[in-house]
Image: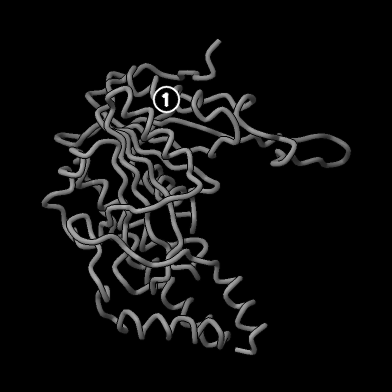
Amino acid sequence: MSDLCYLDEPELDKPALIMGFSGWPNAGEVATGTLNYLLRRLKSRPLAFLKTDAYYDFASHRPTASIQDGLVGELNLPKNKFFYIKGEEKDRDLILFLGQEPHLHWEAFSGLILSLAQDFNVKGIYALGGAYDYLPHWLEPRVSVVCSSPELKFAFEGLDRLETLISAEYQGPVSIHTMLLSKGREKGIPVFGLWGHAPVYIHTGNIKVHRRLVELLSQLINFSIDTNDLVEGIEQMNQKIQMLMQDNPQLKKFIQDLEKTHGKQGGLSTQPSMIGAPSTRGKVISIDDFLKREKENGG
């Protein structure tokens, strides 16, 4: 019995697989927010799911449930679901995956995903992630790129706003993305890791980064989607941040310091990109830790 369970067997023409995981690789809810947006906007249908028992430590990360009047209700386990979209006219067929990063047996878990990719002749896997960065919210969002093989970098030539795409430089603990990149390379399946940089003081609902990732994916993969519906949400996010700045002097000072580095509405102080030097910024701390530190220092 396989832990990969199919719900449908559609005829797909060389689809692309777009993936988002909750958990460690989802800073600012960048990955899951982008996948949920795509699932809302595109005509998706259930394709498959992965069973959960072998891949999660339920003792340290417990499932949830509702119990009312002495009766147990719904038991909420981690969900790992695949959906498919048949492209209209010249649009590419898509498979979307939304799930939770596993705690255990990463190699086997990645093997199931790559097995599905081989079953449907997937021509590219795009794993989305989120990383916090010292960036102001008004700046054009950065996206760090990791490729499973050097020649895949050519896929980014000629794209819009290339200067905001950063060739990733990193050493340290990794996410399930890295296992997928490594195993995809072994099987000859192109895998891209696309990490949206979320301003460290925005922990949820980072619509501007969602929009950037969706537009980048639509160019790389070749599918149509109009993201103008997000413009109002971006404006509301900006207004909410302005209100928070008025109520929190420490946050206001933090953002003003970013203004000094990047300019109020200007571009990057340097231009790290896929065709330039990588970012040299240090490890990002959470805004909660930053404000705590400032308070302890009398800031």
Number of callouts in the render?
1
Q: Pick whichever, 228 or 158, lies toward us.
A: 158
Q: For this rendering, which residue is in front, 179 or 47?
A: 179
User: Does any portion of residue 95 appear in the rendered image?
Assistant: yes
User: Which residue is labeled 1 in the image?
Assistant: 47
Q: Position of residue 11 (x, y in %)?
A: 28, 18
Q: Quadrant of the C terminus?
A: bottom right
- In the rendered image, residue 2, in percent from the top left (x then y), is placed at 52, 14
Furthest toward the right, the residue is 70
The answer to which image quadrant residue 93 occupies is: top left
The reply to whether residue 64 is visible in this rendering is no
The answer to whether residue 38 is above or below residue 48 is below
* Residue farthest front in this picture: 171
Classify 10 Å Cα crowding around label 1: few (below 14), some (14-19), many (20 and above): some
Q: Looking at the picture, which amino acid does disc 1 mark?
A: Leu
In this view, 63 is above or below 235:
above
Residue 245 pos. (x, y %): 51, 84
Task: Tell me the element at label 1.
Answer: strand
Dividing the image into 4 quarters, which one contains the N terminus?
top right
* The quadrant where residue 55 appears: top right
Q: Relative to the observer, which residue lies in front, 228 or 30? A: 30
> In the drawing, does residue 232 fall left or right of residue 64?
left
The structure residue drawn at horizontal position 52% and vertical position 32%, both measured from the top left corner, is 80
Residue 187, x across and y down, in percent: 32, 22
